[in-house]
C-alpha cells in the first residue's frame, strides 16, 4: 500500500528523479513506497518489453499503435539487437516475400528511402542484388524513428537490466530493474537475447535438448559470433587501430582455421562459387553500403570489388565448450568468459586480415557509434592493450540460440519441411500469426544426437534445404503454465531445429509484432493472453499490414 510522504520522503523522491535523469534513463512519473525504511521507485505500464531487438521493438510498436502504454527496456546502449547492436546488418530474408509484412516492411521501406536519397544501393551483401544490407548505425537510426513515431506511448530505456520478475501466484505482474526500480505491468514480453526473463520468472523452458526441470550440462547449443564492422581507410588506418603485435593466442592453427574462409590465393565468388574467398569476395559476403564512400556499388556487379565496409561474421563462429555450452545461457560468469573469448577470436581475425592478408588499409570502423558507456563497462581482460579495437566492436554477440518457453503450442521441423514449389497442400495453422521463409539453419550442434526426442526426427537434418514458407501459430508465444507473460524473440516455443528458421531478423520482427498485438488486446479486455481469441489477433495484425498466412 502507498503511504503518505513526509517532507524528507518528498525530498528523497525528487532526488531520485533527478538522479535517474542524470544517469540517462529518462524522467518518470513515479510514486514512492516505503518498505523497511527503503525508498522504491514504482512505475506503471500496460506492457513492459524486455529486450530492444527486432522482436522487442516490433512488439512495442504494435502495442503502442493499439493505444497501450509501453516501457521498452534494453541492457546495452543500442537498439536493434542482432540487426544492429550485434552487427548483423545483412538481413536474412531468403525470399522477397519476407519484405511484405507489417513492421518489418516499414523498416525495409525506410532503409531503402534513406539510402536511395543518398544515391546508395542496399544490395551490397550475399553476392546478390535482392538483399537488404544496412549499416548498423543507420539501422538503429531508422528504428529510433519508428519508435519515436509512436509518441508518448513508448518509453525507451537503454542501459537497464532486469534483475527480478514480480509474480502473484503463477501470474507475472512486472519486473525489478537495477536503475529504474519496479515497473509494474499487465503483460511482460520477454524479447531478451538469452531468454533470461523466462529463468527469472520461473517459466518452464527448453535449453539445448534438455528442459529446465532436468538440465543437461552436455546439451549442445549453437555457436555465437562476436561481430565487428571493418572498413577501408583511404588515407590509411589510424595508428590506434593498426596492430603493432598479434593479439593473445594468435597461433599457426588459428591461421589455418582462418585460411579455410579467406586467403590470399582464395576464390573470386563472381567466378568460382567456393571457399576460401579472396578478401574482396569475403567483404562482399556481408558487405555494407558505406556512406563514407562516394562511389556506389552492389554485391553482384563487378564494382562489388570496391566494397569498402563489411561485417565480420564468417570464420569467427565461436564453438562453446561441449561440456558446458548449455550453461552459457544460464551461468552469468560462464557467459562473460565465452563472450570475451568470442570477442578475442574476432580481434584475431581482424589481425589476420590486416597482417597476413596484407590489407593494411582495413581495420575496425571507428564511426559506427559502438564506443559507449556500456562497451567500456564490459571490457574483457583478455583484450587488455587492445581497448581501441574492442570498444569499436559490436555491443553484444550474435546469439543464435536461447532458452525457449514450453508453450501452449510447439513449432517443430515437421511443419516446415516442404519443397518451395510443393505439389501437395502445405500444412497450415488456423491460428497462424506470422510467416517465415528462411530454411532451418543450425550453426553447430546439428547431429542427430543433438535433437530433442519427440520433437525433431533425425531424418529432418537431411531435408533442411527443402524447408519453405512456414506459418507460426499463436500458441508458441504463450507459456504453458505462467500468465501475464509472452515470448517474442528466439525464445518462443520451438524445437531446436525449428529455431534455426525463426531466429532471423524478418521473422523475429513479425513474431514480435504478433506478441505486441496479443498483449494489447489482453490489456484492453483485462484478461490473460491465453484467453484472447486468435481471430481477434489476426484481425489486428492484418489491419497493420502483417502477413499471417503462407501463400
Image (spheres, rainbow, N blue to C red):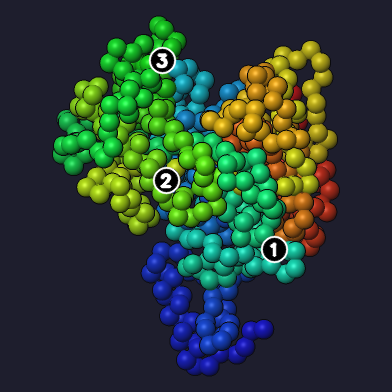
Marked residue nearer the N-terminal end (1 or 2): 1
Mark 1: which secondary structure? strand
**Quadrant of the image containing the C terminus:** top right
Marked residue nearer the N-terminal end (3 or 2): 3
Q: Residue at x 46, y 50 (%)?
A: 335
| Quadrant of res 139 | top left
Measured from the top left, where is residue 128 in percent x and y?
47, 17
Measured from the top left, where is residue 204 in percent x and y?
70, 53
| Of residues 497 and 507, the one drawn nearer to the viewer in this rendering | 497
Q: Is residue 250 left or right of residue 150?
A: left
Disc 1 or disc 2, which is closer to the eye? 2
Using the image, tell me which numbered label, if any, was put on residue 172: 1
| Of residues 142 and 2, the one drawn nearer to the viewer in this rendering | 2
Label 1, label 2: how many angstroms apart (C-alpha)?
30 Å
Number of callouts in the render? 3
Measured from the top left, where is residue 380 in percent x and y?
33, 50
* Residue behind mark 3: 275
Q: Is residue 404 above or below residue 255?
A: below
Q: Is residue 292 left or right of residue 3?
A: left
Q: Is residue 147 in view? A: no
Mark 2: which secondary structure? helix
Measured from the top left, where is residue 72 in percent x and y?
56, 56
* Residue behind mark 2: 339
Marked residue nearer the N-terminal end (1 or 3): 1
Q: Is residue 151 above or below residue 318?
A: below
Label 3, label 2: how many angstroms apart (C-alpha)?
27 Å
Q: Residue at x 45, y 64 (%)?
A: 25
Amino acid at each position: 500500500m502507498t503511504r503518505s510522504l513526509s517532507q524528507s520522503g518528498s525530498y528523497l523522491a525528487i532526488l531520485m528523479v533527478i538522479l535517474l535523469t542524470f544517469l540517462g534513463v529518462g524522467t518518470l512519473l513515479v510514486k514512492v513506497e516505503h518498505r523497511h525504511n527503503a525508498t522504491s521507485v514504482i512505475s506503471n505500464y500496460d506492457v513492459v518489453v524486455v529486450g530492444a531487438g527486432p522482436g522487442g521493438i516490433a512488439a512495442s510498436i504494435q502495442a503502442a499503435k493499439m493505444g497501450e502504454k509501453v516501457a521498452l527496456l534494453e541492457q546495452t546502449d543500442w537498439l536493434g539487437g542482432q540487426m544492429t547492436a550485434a552487427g548483423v546488418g545483412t538481413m536474412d530474408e531468403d525470399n522477397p516475400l519476407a519484405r511484405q509484412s507489417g513492421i518489418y516492411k516499414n523498416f525495409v521501406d525506410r532503409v531503402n528511402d534513406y539510402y536511395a536519397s543518398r544515391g546508395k544501393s542496399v544490395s551490397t551483401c550475399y553476392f546478390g542484388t535482392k538483399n537488404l544490407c544496412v549499416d548498423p548505425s543507420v539501422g538503429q537510426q531508422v528504428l529510433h524513428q519508428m519508435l519515436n513515431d509512436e509518441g508518448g506511448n513508448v518509453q525507451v530505456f537503454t542501459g537497464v537490466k532486469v534483475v527480478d520478475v514480480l509474480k502473484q501466484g503463477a501470474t507475472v505482474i512486472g519486473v525489478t530493474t537495477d536503475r529504474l526500480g519496479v515497473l509494474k505491468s499487465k503483460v511482460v514480453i520477454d524479447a531478451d537475447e538469452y531468454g533470461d526473463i523466462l529463468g527469472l520468472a520461473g517459466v518452464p523452458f527448453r535449453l539445448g535438448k534438455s528442459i529446465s526441470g532436468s538440465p543437461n550440462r552436455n546439451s549442445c547449443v549453437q555457436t555465437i559470433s562476436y561481430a565487428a564492422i571493418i572498413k577501408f581507410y583511404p588515407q590509411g588506418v589510424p595508428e590506434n587501430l593498426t596492430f603493432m603485435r598479434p593479439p593473445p593466442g594468435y597461433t599457426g592453427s588459428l591461421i589455418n582455421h582462418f585460411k579455410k574462409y579467406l586467403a590470399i590465393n582464395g576464390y573470386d565468388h563472381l567466378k568460382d562459387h567456393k571457399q576460401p574467398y579472396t578478401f574482396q569476395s569475403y567483404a562482399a559476403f556481408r558487405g555494407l553500403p558505406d556512406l563514407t564512400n562516394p562511389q556506389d556499388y552492389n554485391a553482384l556487379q563487378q564494382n562489388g570489388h570496391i566494397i569498402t565496409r563489411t561485417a565480420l561474421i564468417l570464420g569467427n563462429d565461436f564453438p562453446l565448450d561441449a561440456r558446458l555450452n548449455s550453461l552459457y545461457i544460464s551461468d552469468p560468469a560462464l557467459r562473460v568468459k565465452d563472450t570475451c573469448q568470442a570477442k578475442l577470436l574476432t580481434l584475431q581475425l581482424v589481425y589476420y586480415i590486416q597482417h597476413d592478408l596484407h590489407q593494411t588499409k582495413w581495420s575496425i570502423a571507428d564511426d559506427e557509434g559502438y564506443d559507449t558507456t556500456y562497451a567500456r563497462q564490459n571490457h574483457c581482460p583478455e583484450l587488455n592493450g587492445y581497448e581501441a579495437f574492442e570498444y569499436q566492436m559490436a555491443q553484444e554477440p550474435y546469439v543464435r540460440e536461447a532458452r525457449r518457453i514450453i508453450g501452449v503450442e510447439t513449432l517443430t521441423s515437421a511443419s516446415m519441411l516442404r519443397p518451395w514449389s510443393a505439389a501437395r497442400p502445405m500444412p497450415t495453422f488456423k491460428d497462424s500469426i506470422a510467416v517465415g521463409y528462411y530454411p532451418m539453419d543450425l550453426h553447430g550442434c546439428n547431429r542427430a544426437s543433438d535433437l530433442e526426442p519427440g520433437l525433431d526426427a533425425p531424418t529432418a537434418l537431411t531435408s533442411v534445404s527443402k524447408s519453405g514458407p512456414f506459418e507460426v501459430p499463436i500458441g508458441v508465444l504463450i507459456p504453458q503454465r505462467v500468465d501475464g507473460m509472452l515470448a517474442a524473440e528466439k525464445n518462443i516455443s520451438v524445437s531446436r531445429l525449428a529455431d534455426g528458421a525463426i531466429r532471423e531478423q524478418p521473422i523475429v520482427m513479425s513474431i514480435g509484432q504478433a506478441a505486441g498485438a496479443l498483449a494489447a488486446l489482453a490489456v484492453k479486455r483485462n484478461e490473460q493472453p491465453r484467453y484472447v481469441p486468435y481471430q481477434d489477433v489476426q484481425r489486428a495484425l492484418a489491419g497493420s499490414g502483417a502477413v499471417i498466412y503462407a501463400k
